Image (cartoon, coloured by chain):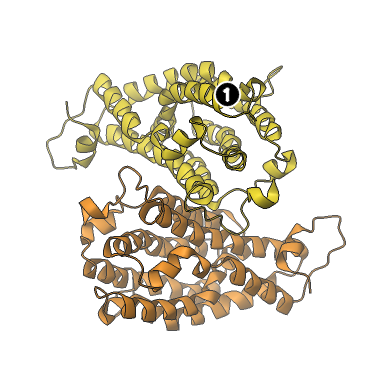
Chain colours: A yellow, B orange
Amino acid sequence: MMGWAEFLEAGAGTNVTAVTPDELEAMIRGIGAERYHNLHPFHKLLHGGELNKGQVQAWALNRYYYQAVIPRKDCALMGTMHDREMRREWRARYFDHDGLGEDDGGIERWLTLTSALGLDRDYVISTKGILSGTRHACDAYVHFVHDKPLLEGIASSLTELFAPKIHSERIAGMLENYDFIDDSMMGYFRKRLTQAPRDVEFALKYVKENARTVPEQQASLRALLFKTGVLWAQLDALYGAYVAPGHIPPGAFDPAKDA
Amino acid sequence: MMGWAEFLEAGAGTNVTAVTPDELEAMIRGIGAERYHNLHPFHKLLHGGELNKGQVQAWALNRYYYQAVIPRKDCALMGTMHDREMRREWRARYFDHDGLGEDDGGIERWLTLTSALGLDRDYVISTKGILSGTRHACDAYVHFVHDKPLLEGIASSLTELFAPKIHSERIAGMLENYDFIDDSMMGYFRKRLTQAPRDVEFALKYVKENARTVPEQQASLRALLFKTGVLWAQLDALYGAYVAPGHIPPGAFDPAKDA
């Protein structure tokens, strides 16, 4: 079978033909194996206990913006869905983050983590201390699903295929390696272990069924590549500002002054 | 006079009052003095001759995307202008980049630079080797002017107030310090020395005349802060990938393989 990179390089006028749904899934998983942010050096430091508390605070503060953007992304995507049943399916993701009934939702669970790490709740919510790189990456995700066809918006969510592994690594690694982290702070990740597989099943099925032509399949794979870039760039920005070279941009959270 | 940071912190319900147009200009210049990307460590390395050719290639390749985005940004902004005379004024910026008549424009001048640095023209134009951080920052700028009121879109262009200094430093520093750079490659920057001051005069006058209330003045300053973040984040991404720690993201330009 052709690899995803070769399949993407093939342009119009070549005699590349559409792949089967299962071949497409294999390419999707191939992108995860090479591009998902569990491969980023920052994650290895985070899970391995090699960060200090200020660096973990910077991660949690910046990642808050990603958490806060996800329900906006899902609402924007639902705004492009003409089919009521599809919206009723997809909104489970929206509820995951903004809450429903007894469940306060993922954003609130994230704020439990940032507060337990000693960050002021209003400061976190204001997002005024986050990196520009974080803001641009997260906003790019919202704009992407707003601007692109529904198929690509759904395909961009498929990084969730690779999420459960990273979440379980993170829970184990962070509990074991940091004395300022305890089980009560891991609620967000624990919840995602069951939410993400349920969510992604629908999305994967949709992409496999609806990306049938070469352009649709290429666009779906490119959407997933775009999304791996959204995740990767956030860790690049954190690494550069808080690990090495440690250039904190003017105005961004500084553990020495703001924590 | 109150500083820009203090003025921005002041919320509704405080008794902060609007500043005069000249005080607003002083705050704008104050933001430049603290946030413009001439202060970024990457610029010091670039101008000081401390980068190798692969690092300069990476800079030129990524910055190409910014150059290519600027006319889209200006067109998007012109799309929000209801006044024909204003569009006829602003379009000089658009011509600067896409060209008019005898002038091939700034994008073409940038491609002269990338080609002279040994980068394949089609590879540069494809933008497939740029960093996600570059793409997100530049796209954020286009979305900003599309989504925000005209005043903020115009205010975000005011970084040009600070550009001529950086361009003349760059011409002198790069010619002096790199044996692979010669005068024929500096056409873009040389041209900007006369274009930018002409362009920014109109924008500064507009912001001073139209940002009269506290919310308008705060929004104008925040737009400029946003834009300094767009420029700063691009250099953060370059520094992290190509200087230190030197983590080139998967798929991005690698001087060892792609040049």
Query: What is the quadrant of the C terminus of chain A in the image?
Result: top right
Q: Secondary structure at mark 1?
A: helix
Residue at 46 percent of width and 39 percent of height: A42
Q: In which image quadrant can residue A250 be found? A: bottom right
Q: In which image quadrant can residue B205 be found? A: bottom right
Give the answer, above or below, for where B25 lies relative to A90: below
Q: Position of residue A81 (x, y in %)?
A: 49, 30
Question: Depth check: B7 or B82 in front?
Answer: B7
Q: Position of residue B169 (x, y in %)?
A: 43, 79
The chain under label 1 reads A
Question: Depth check: B77 or A234 in front?
Answer: A234
Question: Is residue A103 found left or right of A37 in the rendered image?
Answer: right
Q: Residues within 10 Å of mark 1 (few under 14, many from 20)?
A: some
Give the answer, above or below, for where A152 lies relative to B35: above
Question: Is residue A83 found left or right of A35 in the rendered image?
Answer: right
Question: Depth check: A68 or A204 in front?
Answer: A68
Q: Position of residue B212 (x, y in %)?
A: 74, 70
Residue at 63 percent of width and 28 percent of height: A179
Counting labels gives: 1
Question: Is residue A253 found left or right of A156 in the rendered image?
Answer: right
Q: Is residue A148 visible?
A: no
Q: Is residue B141 visible?
A: yes
For label 1, the residue is: A175
Give the answer, above or below, for where B42 lies relative to A240: below
Q: Position of residue A59 (x, y in %)?
A: 56, 40
Residue at 40 percent of width and 56 percent of height: B238
Please name the amino acid that badge 1 sits on.
Leu
Query: What is the quadrant of the N terminus of chain A in the image?
Result: top left
Give the answer, above or below, for where A224 lies relative to B255: above
